Amino acid sequence: MGDWDMQTGTGIRFEWGSAGAGRLAREAACLVTVDVLSFSTTVSVAVEKGIRVLPFGWPGGPATEAEQISATEAAEAYARQWDARLAAHRTTVTPSNPWSLSPAHLRAAPFVARLVLPSPNGAAIAAAAPSGMQVVAACLRNITAVSRWLTSHGYGTPEHPVAVIAAGERWPDGSLRPALEDLLGAGYLICDLHSQGRGPLSTEAAAAMASYESTADIVHAVATSASGRRLAAMGFVADVAIATEDDVCALVPVRDGDGAFAPG
């Protein structure tokens, strides 16, 4: 079968979800997870507050009660291992546990040194990446900072390729739902890297960049996307607003030796 699935010979590569990340990670020097609504955005807000974020892969799609209990117990044990707080679900925050995947919740919550942040998409990709690989969390808020960090570290060439992964969302059956906001975020980053002379682009990366370049109003596109409308219907319009803050964060969340995102 060869290397058809790894976009070999290019400096900037693009794929979707955990499966795509697993494929490209076999040859990439650095992996960037793009989960605009909301893991990567929430990580950027956390890093601004000085919080180290430990990603934790959460089951996506349907799960039995026993599976949910098992996942919760595993997350709690992981938090205890690192003396960290465990983030709640957006809809179950309490005064004693105000931290969640919601960037608005996290922006308002008090400081903690370490936070375990579960998610079935961006967090799952980061948590599953090989331990020796550089992993970066990118979103619309920190594109320039991430792009400059990658180029300053020599990534984005055929010798040191970067894999840009659009995390996507999940359909009710647990399968990957390609998400517009992640395609646009990935395309934005790829565009910036390309403008700095990185590449060449794989065909997939070029298509993602073209999607970004042909979208006149990114804020409107994200807000009216399926994911944006879903969060708005749940009462989390503020999360969408934070996620569409354009290039306001100068910090780059990079996974460290403990598996936590901290400023790179």
Image (cartoon, rainbow, N blue to C red):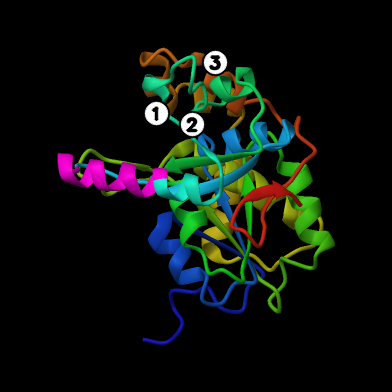
Q: Is residue 68 magenta?
A: yes
Give the secondary structure at mark 1.
loop
Determine the residue positioned at 64% across, 49% down. Answer: 261
x, y percent for residue 117: 49, 40
Q: Amino acid at mark 1?
A: His
Whichever of labels 3 and 1 marks the residue nearer the N terminus, that label is: 1
Relative placement, left or right, of 112 versus 62 is right
Q: Amino acid at mark 3?
A: Ala
Q: Which residues are magenta?
A: 63-76
Instruction: Tell me: residue 208, above or below residue 95.
Output: below
Q: Quick one: 110 or 172, which is closer to the camera?
A: 110
Residue designated by label 2: 101
Viewer can see residue 214: no
Q: Nearer the viewer, mark 3 or mark 1?
A: 1
Q: Quadrant of residue 238?
A: top right
Q: Quadrant of residue 245?
A: top right
Residue contact at pointers 2 and 1, CB within 8 angstroms: yes
Residue contact at pointers 3 and 1, CB within 8 angstroms: no
Relative placement, left or right, of 68 versus 215 is left
Q: CA distance from mark 3 to mark 2?
A: 13 Å
Q: CA distance from mark 3 to mark 1?
A: 16 Å
Q: Which mark is residue 89?
A: 1
Q: Which mark is residue 238?
A: 3
Determine the residue positioned at 62% across, 48% down. Answer: 137
Instruction: Tell me: residue 240, above or below residue 3.
Output: above
In the picture as drawn, the residue positioned furthest to the bottom comes out as 2
Q: CA distance from mark 2 to mark 1?
A: 7 Å
Relative placement, left or right, of 179 versus 30 is left
Give the secondary structure at mark 2.
loop
